Image: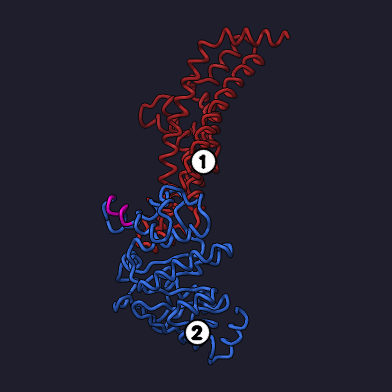
Amino acid sequence: MLKGSNIHKSFGNLEVLKGIDLEVAPSEVVVLVGVSGSGKSTLLRCFNFLERINEGSIEVDGQVIDPKKHKLSNIRAEVGMVFQHFNLFPHMTVLENVIEAPMIVKKMKKADAIVLAKSLLDKVGLADKADVYPSKLSGGQKQRVAIARSLAMEPKVLLFDEPTSALDPELVGEVLSVMQQLAQEGMTMVVVTHEMKFAREVADRVIMLDEGRIIESADPVTFFENPSHERTKQFIQLVD
Amino acid sequence: MELLQTVWDVFLRTYPGFLEATLITLKITAVALVLGTILGLLFALMKISRSKILQTIANLYITIIRGTPLIVQIMFLYFGITSLIVLSGFWAGAIALGIHNGAYIAEIFRGAIQGIDKGQREASSSLGMTRSQSMRRIVFPQALKRSIPPLGNQFIITLKDSSLVYIISVPELFSMANIEAAQSFQSLETYLVVGVYYLVLVMIFTYLLKLYENKLDVDK
């Protein structure tokens, strides 16, 4: 569904990604972990073309994407992204946030977009907040709206960039449970998170990044119980 | 007390003419604001565009306008343009003020647009919007709202700056005050009266702006 080969990315002289190979199968849930600065967020942003890679290639649904030839907006419409700081549109109500992209990008009729948006808001448990502005929502509610907004584009893959890191601890659960539900429904997901419980319970595969390289890639049981790399062991001890 | 009395006398004697002149001041300000806003938007867009040529043109305009006195611009435009086409003092003054304002308003818009969190643009492009779609639908509406307080400020400055067109004999408020002061020899009283005219206009303007800002806050 999503495949990165030999991805290199530098910011100035700093090489953040040093040759990443990662293939995500349809309906697979991959959790990326690693200390800060290991390059996990950058990798996610490369998959969404918010960052241009310096070397290597990215395939979406079997098609190699060349930023020079393809219209990136079309590709991004298929690869959704949920951000740490939600990035909801503050001048629009919750409903308007969700119907915006289907209407503007997919030229969906407003009435159809509203039906779609209401069902998605219902799914994330916020049907009653449709006409509220984002400033009136809690962090957990904002992130659930952001998820609904991404889902409205019916993406093939959904990327999560530390979706619960900006939340108060008591609000983390509601977001994770929505994500878990999506995983069970077969959504292909790549998740950068520090929530190890989520990684254990929901991930099909956990990947450890260290200094721009993948050093461990295993199913959650193996990853947490029997990691092969010393750095992974240290990391697990640190966060668990 | 005596001063108050003579000020009051001057006020009573001058108000028919001064009110008429106030109307001209308001008209010239309105034209300058409309023109300034259009130019400001245009040059702000040029400045944030990806074209080096457009950026350079915008920078040049802003540098020249901000780097020279308004009164020089008014004179330059008046004598410059009227040597080419017939233009009344009113229109020469209004256009000069508009061009002057455009440079400041361009900076207000540019600042507001660039002040929008880059996460907004990232979120809209991650949803598949093109650059222009995300500008139009996401960035501009928020930037416009953020521009309103500094724009209001610029509007007040323009209202007061419009007094400078007295130099090309537009019969606006300050011109009338000059004439009145010269004829009556009551300079102190006359300028006091005309100062109050400006003060009241600015206060009304500020009040209306405040109402509008409050309304925007409620809307959100």
In the picture, the quarter occupied by the N terminus of chain A is bottom left
Mark number, residue B85: none
Can you give x and y, in whole percent of width and height, for residue A222 in the image? 49, 89
Q: Is residue A13 something that shows in the picture?
A: no
Q: Determine the CA span between mark 1 and mark 2.
A: 48 Å
Q: Nearer the viewer, mark 1 or mark 2?
A: 1
Which amino acid type is shown beneath numbered disc 1? Asp
**Dot 2 alpha-carbon crowd within 10 angstroms: few under 14, some 14 to 19, many 20 or more:** some
Q: Quadrant of residue B71?
A: top right
Residue placed at 47% from the left, 20% from the top?
A: B23
User: Is A32 displayed left or right of B132 in the figure?
Assistant: right
Q: The disc numbered 2 marks a residue on which chain? A: A
**Chain that is coloured blue in the picture:** A
Provide the residue designation for mark 1: B217
Is residue B184 placed above or below A215 in the rendered structure? above
Can you give x and y, in whole percent of width and height, for residue A117 in the image? 35, 56
Judging depth in this view, the residue of B87 and A129 nearest the camera is A129
Tell me which secondary structure the magenta stretch mostly adopts.
Answer: helix
- Do the residues marked 1 and 2 share a common chain? no
**Chain that is coloured red in the picture:** B
Please give the range of residues in magenta. Answer: A111-116
Provide the residue designation for mark 2: A213
**Any magenta on residue B70?**
no
Judging depth in this view, the residue of A201 and B24 nearest the camera is A201
Is residue A36 placed above or below B7 in the rendered structure? below
Q: Secondary structure at mark 1?
A: helix
